[in-house]
Image (tube, helix red, strand yellow):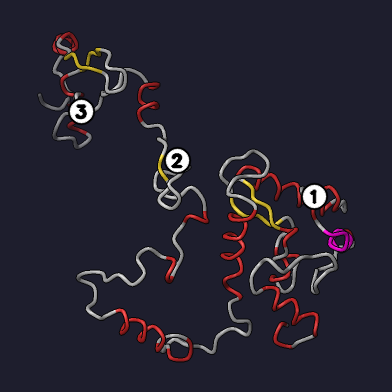
């Protein structure tokens, strides 16, 4: 087959047609190949040149074959439905931690290094803190970058890995966002942490903005959990720059130490 004069004028030197005429096309359609559906095993008719594409008789069979299958958690052994194909653990608490809690801690990785565990531990100590060539003096509050990671793990263990509204897999969420606190560590108190899925997290953020803009902090989602001092400050439009009465900072890691420093008026916590 050769390109048509119109195709040749456009610069095409090879035709894109499969058949030279309608007669050949009709003959090819009559020479279908029979095969079984990969989903329900029912017979289907497929063109010879599309054998690698048509494996299912319908879209429903395709969706059933590619649906998310139950998986066994690598941490606790429980069966769960992963929200994405790469998830191996049912909740945040089952994810291996760093250090001795990691199942690969102390194991040698072949073809990567030849040091013993003792030598690697010594090198790690020598490269920590001021011994690291990239050391820039450190932060004034040691460990402050670990707050959100600690809060996520704490919420998964004590509140649960599922959304408190619908029961689907969720993640930690702050009722009052960190932009209303200065420093941001003040937002890490127990009453301010909830577990929500992506949908209810989005709805909660939207409802919070509407309630604050209208000057009605008691209409904030989960406002009944917040101390009265927080609601009064939000109603007045104040930035929360000091520990408020009724906020429980004790369970959320070393943020309690910083809050205690703020209450003492320590300059390091400013």
Q: Position of residue 51 (x, y in %)?
A: 19, 24
Q: Nearer the viewer, mark 1 or mark 3?
A: 1
Q: Position of residue 135 (x, y in %)?
A: 47, 88
Q: Nearer the viewer, residue 32 or 180?
A: 180
Residue at label 1? 220
Q: Find the magenta span and give its range.
A: 227-234
Spatial CA distance of label 3 from label 2 is 34 Å
Helix, strand or loop at label 3? It is: loop
Helix, strand or loop at label 2? It is: strand
- Name the image quarter holding the N terminus: top left
Q: Which mark is residue 52?
A: 3
Q: Which of the two labelled residues, at mark 3 and mark 2, occupies the earlier sequence position?
A: 3
State which quadrant residue 144 falls in. Answer: bottom right
How many marks the image carries: the answer is 3
* Image vertical order of residue 64 relative to residue 47, above or below: below
Residue at label 2? 79
Q: Nearer the viewer, mark 1 or mark 2?
A: 2
Could you tell whether 254 is left or right of 38 in the image? Answer: right
Given contact means CB atoms under 8 Å apart, are the residues at marks 1 and 3 in contact? no
């Amino acid at each position: 087959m050769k390109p048509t004069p119109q195709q040749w004028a456009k610069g095409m030197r090879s035709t894109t047609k499969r058949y030279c005429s309608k007669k050949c096309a009709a003959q090819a359609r009559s020479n279908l190949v029979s095969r079984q559906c990969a989903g329900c095993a029912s017979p289907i008719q497929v063109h010879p040149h599309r054998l690698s594409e048509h494996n299912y008789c319908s879209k429903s069979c395709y969706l059933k074959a590619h649906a998310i299958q139950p998986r066994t958690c690598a941490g606790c052994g429980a069966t769960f439905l992963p929200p994405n194909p790469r998830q191996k653990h049912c909740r945040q608490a089952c994810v291996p931690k760093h250090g001795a809690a990691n199942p690969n801690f102390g194991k040698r990785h072949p073809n990567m290094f030849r040091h013993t565990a003792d030598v690697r531990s010594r090198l790690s100590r020598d490269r920590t803190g001021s011994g690291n060539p990239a050391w820039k003096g450190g932060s004034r509050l040691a460990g402050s970058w670990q707050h959100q990671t600690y809060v996520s793990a704490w919420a998964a263990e004590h509140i649960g890995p599922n959304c408190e509204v619908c029961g689907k897999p969720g993640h930690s969420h702050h009722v009052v966002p960190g932009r209303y606190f200065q420093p941001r560590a003040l937002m890490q108190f127990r009453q301010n942490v909830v577990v929500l899925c992506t949908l209810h997290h989005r709805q909660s953020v939207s409802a919070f903005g509407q309630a604050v803009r209208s000057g009605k902090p008691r209409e904030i989602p989960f406002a009944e959990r917040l101390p009265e001092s927080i609601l009064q400050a939000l109603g007045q439009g104040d930035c929360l720059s000091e520990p408020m009465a009724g906020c429980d900072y004790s369970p959320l890691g070393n943020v309690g130490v910083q809050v205690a420093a703020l209450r003492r008026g320590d300059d390091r916590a400013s």
